[in-house]
Image: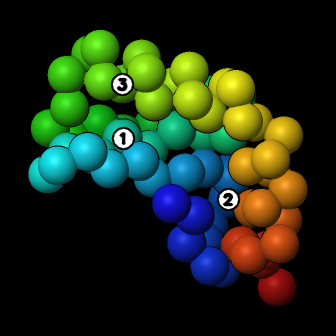
């Protein structure tokens, strides 16, 4: 999930059940993890890496800073 008007650096929030991981889009680095297993975090990183260009374009559309 990308929140509208969110703060830099560009990132996505990925949820699974009660867990969440926040991943920087440009570097595909994990910023925060809550309640997810290491394997789930790796899968989330792989998904972000595979869709990085799309996520960057979406960030620029919905979360630009003023």
Q: Is residue 60 visible?
A: yes
From the top left corner, tell me how far across and down residue 24 is, in percent. Answer: 61, 39
Q: Crowding near pointer 3: few (<14 within 10 Å), some, many (20+)?
A: many
Compared to residue 55, the image places residue 61 above or below, namely below
Q: Residues within 10 Å of mark 2 (few under 14, many from 20)?
A: few
* Local SS, label 1: strand
Secondary structure type for disc 3:
helix
Residue position for label 1: 21
Q: Quadrant of the C terminus?
A: bottom right
Return the disc, 3 or 1, that comes first in the chain's sequence.
1
The first of marks 2 and 3 along the sequence is: 2
Q: Residue 1: x percent and y percent?
A: 50, 60
Q: Which mark is residue 41?
A: 3
For residue 8, the mark is 2
Asked if residue 31 lies left or right of residue 38, the reply is right
The reply, left or right, for residue 19 in relation to residue 2 is left
**Disc 3 and disc 1: Cα gap in Å?**
7 Å
Image mark count: 3
């Amino acid at each position: 999930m990308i929140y509208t008007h969110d703060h830099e650096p560009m990132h996505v929030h990925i949820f699974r059940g009660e867990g969440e991981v926040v991943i920087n889009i440009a570097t595909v680095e994990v910023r925060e993890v809550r309640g997810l297993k290491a394997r789930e975090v790796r899968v989330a990183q792989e998904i972000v890496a595979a869709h990085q260009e799309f996520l960057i374009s979406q960030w620029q559309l919905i979360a630009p800073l003023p």
